[in-house]
Image (cartoon, helix red, strand yellow):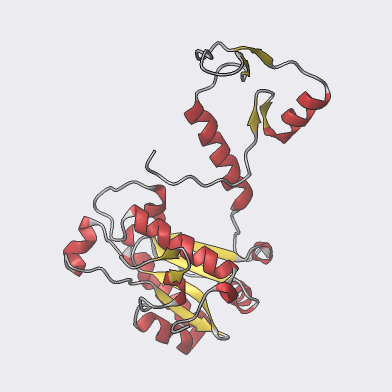
């Protein structure tokens, strides 16, 4: 295995079935699930007895379902204008087409950010239509701070790229992006809008969302999947604990 493994603690699957209720009920009712192994030769182990799940599900399916459970528990949709953002610390807005926020939607996002929330916006696939709309809306909401933040990308020594054990010093782009940016481009292009002495909004004209899916398909203007994932990880970690991140020069 060459990929990284993240243990979330969510998504319980045991020989009793799916979910914590099945586990609890199975334990307290004394349901018998241990039996001689049928799925592999246990000769090399101390006991031939295992607790096998009913139906012999494939491991990849089990892991996939656990991952889905984790995402469902950790992420939720928050339609603007319904007050759903009050339960969140980070909001992510992405899309591929032109859009216009309502006055109510703008006010809700502004309140979310002003109350300590972190807003992440990226242009899915590198959509220019979405980029124009997003930049227009950011200026409408945050005025001069947005104009200044969108004028140039964050520097390499920005704290979000310098997290202990997660420092980013190489920013690789997809092939399609390199035809527009130049083959030698290795600098970040992520922008940040500073409000109340903190970077409260992160904006990427280059795709992050498709990169998070992990598919290295061509025709997308953005970072490679691994770099997109690393950037998003760092933003989330920094948003959660900005006080724990050393400032440049310290």
**Where is residue 98 drawn, in percent x and y?**
39, 65
Location of residue 149 (image quadrant): bottom left
Seen from the viewer's position, the closer of residues 114 and 45 is 45
Depicted 161 relative to depicted 148: above or below: above
Name the residue rendered at 33%, 46% in the picture: 215
Q: Is residue 1 left or right of residue 101?
A: left
Q: Is residue 48 left or right of residue 27?
A: left
Depicted 214 relative to depicted 45: above or below: below
Residue closest to the far bottom: 144
Name the residue rendered at 42%, 63% in the picture: 231
Count the labels in the image: 0
Name the residue rendered at 58%, 16% in the picture: 55
Name the residue rendered at 50%, 83% in the picture: 194
Depicted 194 relative to depicted 42: above or below: below
Seen from the viewer's position, the closer of residues 127 and 24 is 24
Q: Quadrant of the N terminus?
A: top left
**Where is residue 110 drawn, in percent x and y?**
59, 77
**Where is residue 132 drawn, in percent x and y?**
36, 72
């Amino acid at each position: 295995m060459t990929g990284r493994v993240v243990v979330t603690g969510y998504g319980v699957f045991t020989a009793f079935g799916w979910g914590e209720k099945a586990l609890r009920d199975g334990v307290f009712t004394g349901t018998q699930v241990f039996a001689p192994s049928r799925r592999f030769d246990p000769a090399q182990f101390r006991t031939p007895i295992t607790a096998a799940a009913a139906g012999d599900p494939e491991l990849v399916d089990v892991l996939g379902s656990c991952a889905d459970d984790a995402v469902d528990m950790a992420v939720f949709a928050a339609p603007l204008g319904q007050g759903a953002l009050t339960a969140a610390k980070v909001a992510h807005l992405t899309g591929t087409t032109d859009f216009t926020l309502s006055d109510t939607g703008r006010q809700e996002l502004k309140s979310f950010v002003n109350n300590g929330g972190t807003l992440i916006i990226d242009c899915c696939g590198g959509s220019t239509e979405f980029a124009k709309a997003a930049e227009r809306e950011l200026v409408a909401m945050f005025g001069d701070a947005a104009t200044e933040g969108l004028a140039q990308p964050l520097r390499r020594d920005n704290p979000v790229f310098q997290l202990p054990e997660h420092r980013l010093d190489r920013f690789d782009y997809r092939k399609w992006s390199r035809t527009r940016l130049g083959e030698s481009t290795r600098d970040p292009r992520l922008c940040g809008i500073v409000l109340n002495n903190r970077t409260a909004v992160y904006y990427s004209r280059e795709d992050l969302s498709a990169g998070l899916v992990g598919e290295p398909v061509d025709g997308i203007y953005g970072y490679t999947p691994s770099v997109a994932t690393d950037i998003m990880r760092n933003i989330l970690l920094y948003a959660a604990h900005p006080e724990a991140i050393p400032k440049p020069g310290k």
